[in-house]
Image (spheres, rainbow, N blue to C red):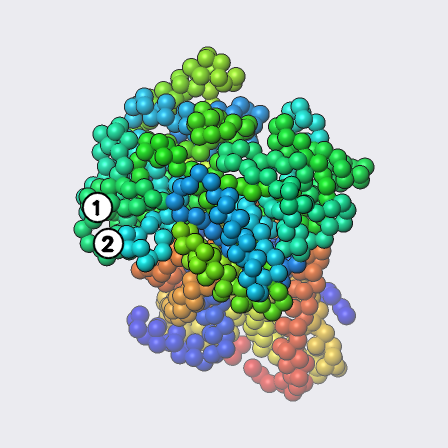
Amino acid sequence: MFSYYLQLGLRSLRRNPVLTGLMVMAIGFGVAASMTTYSVFRATSRDPIPQKSSQLYMTQLDNWGPDKLEKGEPPAALSYKDATALLNAHKAKRQAITYPVGVSVIPEDPSRLPVREGAYATGSDFFPMFDVPFIQGNGWTREDDDKHASVAVISKSLNDKLFNGGQSVGKQVNLDGRLFRITGVIQDWAPQPLFFDVPNTGGFDEGASVYVPFNRAIDLKMPNDGNNNCVEEPGEGWDNYLRSECIWLSLWSELPAKADADAYRQYVTGYAAAQQAAGRFRWAPNVKVRDVMTWLDVQRVIPPESEVSLIVSLGFLVICLVNTVGLLLAKFMRRAPEIGVRRALGASRRDIYAQFLIEAGTIGVAGGVLGLLLTGLGILGVGLVFPEQIARLATIDPVLILLTLVVSIVASLIAAFYPTWRAAQVQPAWQLKSN
Amino acid sequence: MQIQPILSALRRHKAGTILIALQIALTLAIVCNALFIVHERIDRINRTTGMDETNVVAIQNRYVGSPENFVPLMKSDVQTLRSLPGVEDAYVTNAFPLRQGGWSTGAQTDPDSKKEGVHTALYFGDEHTLKTLGVRLIAGRNFSPSEVVTVQPQQSPGAPQVIITKVLADKIFPDGNALGKVIYLAKGKPSTIIGIVEKLTVPWIEWDTMDNVTIMPVLFNSGYQHFLIRTKPGQQDAVFKDAPKALYAANRMRVLPEKYGVRTFEMVRARAYQADRGMAILMSVVCGVLLAITAAGIVGLSSFWVGQRRKQIGVRRALGARRSDILSYFMTENFLIALVGVIVGVILAVGLSQWMFTHFEMKRLSLTYVGIGVVALLALGQAAVFAPALRASRVSPVEATRSV
């Protein structure tokens, strides 16, 4: 029966190619617009580290005073004083401070020009905490942290550039004229959104190719390459900067269980209260310890353009559906006499439903195929609307292909439901009489 | 034209009527919001910077290594650039309009004030800055070479002389006599306003006070800076190629990033407004396709109605109705449906805009756009129904006598 109805449906669609084309196009355009914008939305709203996102926490505390804050939200980074005090208390399974340090890598071969690389100063816990994948060696050790060792971890692409992809653990890399011993090479690792450095990247960035120990970077006075916010003059020199209330450091902690997170939150609140008692803060503790997804949400990582265009294109899909409902209604009702004859010859309402829903389903399939082609074009054009760091994340994968087809078919069936119901209501006697 | 018979006929086609009205309503809601977004973005893109943007090249530079003092390097690089054949003038700075990154501070008139002051962006420069940017000095004088001071990192920048924009001058000194007055841009560092420029915008494209800019005669001792170059007319392309070569020839211990390292000002502008232009394109395409689909839907449904009513049309024609009566019947019918559609649509449009206003901090829809949308959709409906209506008017009175 299915194949017979399919044949009937195809024949009926062929009979009226303009109307059919119109419906296919309406569904195709509607679905393609929604899927293209959805692909961007999906990329910007995804969980960058799904296996651990609920165990990783960003620490914020108010060292500025409530009158300097926007809506009571503590600053998105910590001062050197607070970050190091919280780190040295060792209240989490793993913990690392990070800040971006732009470095220039000077190749050993003097005929080659220096290259600028993105880099982070951080602690040894960074690598196991974020499950950073190593292809050679390992991260440096906690001992290296304590010794302020001059060591570094580099990315695969930098290893390719400097050592032609060869074994480089134990070799030296020259950063701005200072030598660092390589302890490990990682995959080019840049989870998107780049959750551990949202304030400086907006969440979408190519990631870094060099990591050096935080303690060493501070010794070398490696300037912060990211945002620096001060509410008052820090005074001249590096030491005054470290003593200042300027905020520029991120502190991430791994807290495996909820109880750990609560205990840690309590500890940080206690720390802030102690600062208040000591007279440094003249306000009550304002502390936020947030996991990855909450942090991304609060930082509004999803660009408003992504949400607005998703909403507009969903509205567009709804209009296309309303349009299809109207056209299907016209098409089906025009065949009222035919339906009357079929019903009179013994077809049940269920048969009519089956026949017309299958006909609509074929429109959905055709619309889905068109939608898929247009989604492909749309994704190529995403770069016109979104910055390239985001556009490159919008890709077609099997899930999106399947979703496109499913949405088209479901949409066409939803659109067909009312017209089919009307068709099934056709009274055979009426139709036969007027004929 | 009798409206009554049209209404009673529509009562027999409730579903089709509602569908067309709904489609018009939704289309109106989306189209006027989308057009509003397009308009807003185009307005942003068309803002001027106060600069003469032709023949300007911007170079992003980072020195490699960590010397204590970058100032001699910067000075000699600027000299290198100024001596290039196609170069009119050049200077070194921290930021410039549309760069999307820079410094800002609060300007005070009272050195001990606890208040935030008037927000202003800070541009570092020297006596070559005004000429390179191509901004017009409308009062006072330019910097002199001896006024340029060196500022160390972690030191808040302040210079004894500054040049500010007209808008900023009027905001700090509403009486209009800012020239020669003293302002404080950092604690304990008075700056005398020695000149006022007509217009210059901040480095960001989204800021509450786009025209509040202060230029300071400052060399900032840092490994990271920008060189701005004004080329002689017609020499932009040559300088674009030669300037980086000349810099590398002078000193190879530097990085000019592959991407966005060397840019003409057209490239700077294109990148700054990329998202706005993209959004405008996207919304225009959506509007176009949406209107086309709605029009096609109206044509489809109207044609169906005309086909269904051939017999009745024939009867009316046989009873003496003229072709124009039939034509205007269908046109009026569509107009009535569209009218209901746009009324609902206006409510939806305002609701959608209100929702976007609260969720995305977007501006509220201007009523002009609702008006434009209403007129456009009524016209679209009339245009779309015209062909089916014309076909209806050609139905011959003979149809009345046919049995089917």
Residue B211 % position (x, y): 67, 46
Rendered image quadrant of residue B2: bottom right
Mark 1 nearby-residue class (10 Å; few <14, some 14–19, many ≥20)? some
Q: In this view, does A160 lie to the left or right of B19?
A: left
Rendered image quadrant of residue B145: top right
The residue shown at (41%, 28%) is: A80
Per the model, the C-alpha gap separating discs 2 and 1 is 10 Å
Rendered image quadrant of residue A71: top right
Q: In this view, does B98 lie to the left or right of B340?
A: left
Q: In the structure shown, which secondary structural element does the residue marked by tag 2 occupy?
A: helix
Subunit ID for the residue under disc 1: A
Q: Is residue A7 above or below residue A318?
A: below
Q: Which mark is residue A171?
A: 1
Residue A332 % position (x, y): 48, 71
- Disc 1 marks a residue whose amino acid type is Lys
Q: Residue A163 carries which label?
A: 2
Residue A169 % position (x, y): 19, 45
Q: In this view, does A299 lie above or below A368?
A: above
User: Which one is in front, B388 or A196?
Assistant: A196
Is residue A279 in view from this perspective?
A: yes
Q: In the structure shown, which secondary structural element does the residue marked by tag 1 occupy?
A: loop
